[in-house]
């Protein structure tokens, strides 16, 4: 097994100053949006995390298991996932988050 962590640094001083570290899990991708860390997990979930504590604020689960999710990005307030399925190859899916975490 591997240990993972979210690590915060202050980039202003030279060298960078270590601020904190919180335990984390292995993930596909991570992004910062709207004051939250958004994490794409291996099991078709997207989690919104508090960037200071690493605690989950909300988790969103997909019921579409016909694709594998390989990455994601925000464009404004729109969330897109790069997915691969056997029928169409790579596709770009827009996900709608139904509740504000």
Image: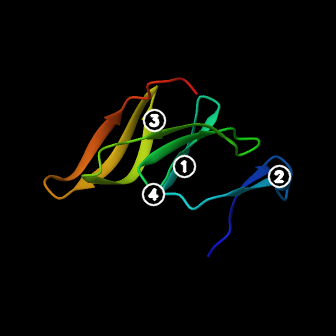
Outermost left residue: 87
- Residue denoted by label 2: 20
Q: Which mark is on residue 53?
A: none
* Whole-number angstrom distance, CA of label 4 to CA of label 1: 12 Å
**What is the x, y in percent for residue 44?**
41, 50
Q: Secondary structure at mark 3?
A: strand
Q: Residue at x 26, y 55 (%)?
A: 84
Q: Is residue 95 above or below residue 47?
A: above
**Residue situated furthest bottom in the rendering:** 1
Q: Residue furthest front?
A: 63
Q: Earlier in the sequence, mark 3 or mark 4?
A: 4
Q: Residue at x 43, y 55 (%)?
A: 43
* Gap between marks 1 and 3 measured at Cα: 11 Å
Cα separation between marks 1 and 2: 18 Å
Query: Left or right of 66: which side holds 20?
Result: right
State how far apart marks 3 and 4 are (Cα): 19 Å
Where does residue 5 sit, x and y in percent of width and height? 70, 60
Numbered circle sitting on residue 42: 4
Q: Earlier in the sequence, mark 4 or mark 1?
A: 1
Q: CA distance from mark 2 to mark 3?
A: 26 Å
Which secondary structure, mark 1?
A: strand
In this rendering, would 17 be left or right of 70?
right
What residue is disc 1 on? Answer: 30
Residue for badge 3: 74
Q: Nearer the viewer, residue 101 or 30?
A: 101
């Amino acid at each position: 097994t591997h240990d993972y962590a979210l690590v915060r640094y202050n980039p202003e001083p030279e060298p960078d100053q270590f601020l904190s570290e919180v335990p984390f899990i292995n993930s596909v991708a991570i992004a910062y949006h709207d004051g939250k860390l958004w994490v794409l997990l291996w099991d078709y979930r997207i989690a919104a995390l508090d960037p200071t504590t690493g605690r989950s604020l909300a988790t969103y689960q997909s019921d579409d298991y016909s694709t594998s999710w390989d990455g994601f990005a925000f464009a404004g307030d729109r969330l897109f996932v790069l997915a691969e399925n056997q029928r169409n190859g790579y596709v770009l899916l827009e996900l709608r988050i139904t509740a504000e975490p």
